[in-house]
Image: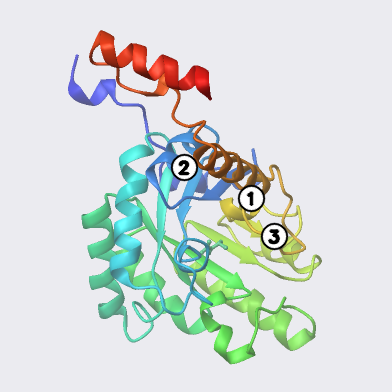
Amino acid sequence: MSRHSEAPRRITAPDIRARKGGEPIVCLTAYTAPMAEILDQHCDLLLVGDSLGMVVHGLPSTVGVTMDMMILHGQAVMRAAKKAMVVVDMPFGSYEASPEVAYANAARILKETGAQAVKVEAGVTVAPTVKFLVDRGIPVMSHVGLLPQAVNIDGKFKAKGRDEAERAAILAAARASDEAGAFAIVVEGVDETLAPEITAAVKAPTIGIGASAECDGQVLVVDDMLGLFGWTPKFVRRYANLKDEIDKAAAGYAADVRARRFPAAAETYSLSKARQARVAQRDKRG
Ligand code: KIV
């Protein structure tokens, strides 16, 4: 049997594209190997999102995220994910200046992580860059609507599509990235009536986050859906409350260490009979 036939088949950009109007695409963000290993079996797409700047590194926005950060986390996710397609976000400042700069950085991401595609936040002006990358062999997922990397323009994260001009600009951006060859389009934080319009207008599948169920798939930031923060945006559904679980676990550990209940005999190397007896006696004394 050849080496290739033993590896599980990884989902590809054409597989995702073919899901337009079909079975919904399941996507979550992932930033570390252990999390990617768990999510891989449930997701079609794992996004190494630049949201890692906020949820892993404690930055106030995604603007401070660097290429090196994205590559380090992309490598970790790729070591553990075997089935899902892995997409790595291009960080702020790595693709906007010119298609050539974008190509150099996107190629570096694909070479150094082994991921299958990159994602860019794409207004109409970024569409030629999407085309430049796709024409040169780099699959691109685009991102329209609320663009977190542009937070300094709005001054805060603000849902989009409130007036006709904003709706038209978002629709134009989605159409432009579709025509440029994006294999999928993330639609973030838009009025619920806009997502079906975008989904109907483009050939690429749309993947919504805060964009209504009228998309070809959904994505959430995994830390939000696991309840790792005290606060979650309106569009997040919490499937677990891990912040409270971790809090309880840490409190239990701290209490055990302070009361000398941890470690017990079973959690100690017993390398000699005499020592075993001493530990057992100590545990009995409490
Ligand atoms: O960085 C990220 O996690 C994202 C998702 C919100 C789509 O871009």
Can you give x and y, in whole percent of width and height, for residue 271 in the image? 23, 16
**Amino acid carrying mark 3 in the image:** Gly
Which is more N-terminal, label 1 or label 2? 2
Of tags 3 and 2, which is closer to the observer? Answer: 3
- State which quadrant residue 234 falls in: bottom right
Which is more N-terminal, label 2 or label 3? 2
The disc label shown at residue 226, or none = none
Task: Say which residue label 2 marks.
Answer: 35
Answer whether labels 3 and 1 touch (C-beta < 8 Å).
yes
The quarter in which the N terminus is drawn is top left
In the figure, is residue 142 to the left or right of 200? left
Give the structural element (helix, strand or loop) at label 3: loop
Task: Say which residue label 1 marks.
Answer: 243
**Amino acid carrying mark 2 in the image:** Met
Residue at coordinates 37% horizontally, 30% vertically from top-left?
9
Residue at coordinates 31% horizontally, 75% vertically from top-left?
102
141 or 284: nearer the viewer: 284
